Amino acid sequence: MPRQISGYEFHLIGDMTLKQFAELSAGAILALLCWSLPIMTIFKFPLVLFFIFLGISLAFVPVNEQPLDRWIINFFKAVYSPTQFIWKKSEVSLDFLERQVYLKPAEPSKPITSTNGKKLAEYLRTIPTTPLSPFEKEIEAGLQRITSLFEGLGIPSIPPPSPPPKIPEVKMGKHKAVKIDREVKIPKVKLPKVVEVEKKVKKEIKKPEIIAIPKFKRVPRKTIEPKFEPKLPMPSRPTTPNILVGMILDHQGKILPDVIVEIRDKNGFPVRALRANKLGQFRIANPLKNGTYEVELEKEGYKFDIIKFTTRGEIIEPMEIRAKGKLT
């Protein structure tokens, strides 16, 4: 059978290797040396037992399948080896930046002479011309139609300006004075057809009509006065002014849970919206501003009155709200 010979150890007696025999012998020799020391027996006996036990442990007692001598060596390595490493940046020179690049000087361009121009013209004449594709023919025909439309407008061409007259020079010592005889005016050109089209478009455009939007008028609704009951079973009474709390009951006085409560201001805009809990209790978190408000409640199958109340910067007692009855 194949066998790893690099880790092979010579066995003396049974499974005891030469290494184990050396460790056991070292422990016995140290124990004999301690016994032969001229000291008291009280100190010799523990030393002898320690070295005997150490030799036996090194030879025959493994820890986690590792010999004890390896554990001792690793312990001292861990104690005396460095535990803190400091990284220092090493400067690396970029060789490609230090290289010198030699560029070949460009040759001066030759001037174009008459002979070169004739040769270029002759070469261009020899290049065969490709016929236009159908798509290019359509583009060219479209461009011709566009130019014919502009020619049909009858826009007169602008005549070139007359050359300015010669200005005589008058010598005045070292300076020169210039005298202008007349001004050169460029005649204005009128576009008759374009002007007529602009006039027609201006006539057809009408001014926008301003429609007055009527102001919103709120229809007054029938409301009732609230009923405040300090003895309602609420978790805690309000201690901050303008905090609304309350409890909702049906027409028989039973708790009515999950009712939607909406608080509106005097203009009918909603300022708070919340839902009552399973015990019919509700409470707003932020105080209301001083003013008049309406409380509107909604739950499927029940009808409620609209409650109107006023806040004056005072603590509001718990409000008891009862349904008018069930909807049939």
Image (cartoon, rainbow, N blue to C red):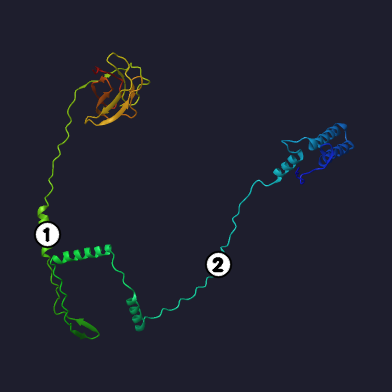
Query: Is 236 left, or right, of 83 in this rendering?
Result: left
Helix, strand or loop at mark 2: helix
Query: Is 105 left, or right, of 26 in this rendering?
Result: left
User: Which residue corresponds to the image point at 22% horizontal and 83% vertical from the top-left?
Assistant: 176
Q: Nearer the viewer, residue 207 or 61?
A: 61
| Foreground disc of the pair 1, 2 | 1
User: Which residue corresponds to the image point at 56% horizontal and 63% vertical from the top-left?
Assistant: 94
Instruction: Tell me which amino acid carries mark 1.
Output: Val
Residue 270 sits in quarter: top left
Helix, strand or loop at mark 1: helix
Q: Residues within 10 Å of mark 1 (few under 14, many from 20)?
A: few
Q: Position of residue 2 (x, y in %)?
A: 75, 44
Q: Name the residue tied to disc 2.
A: 98
Q: Name the residue tied to disc 1.
A: 197
Q: Position of residue 244 (x, y in %)?
A: 31, 25
Residue 140 appears in the rendering:
yes
Q: Nearer the viewer, residue 223 or 122?
A: 122
Query: Is 56 left, or right, of 302 in this rendering?
Result: right
Q: Nearer the viewer, residue 196 or 127?
A: 127
Residue 140 sits in quarter: bottom left
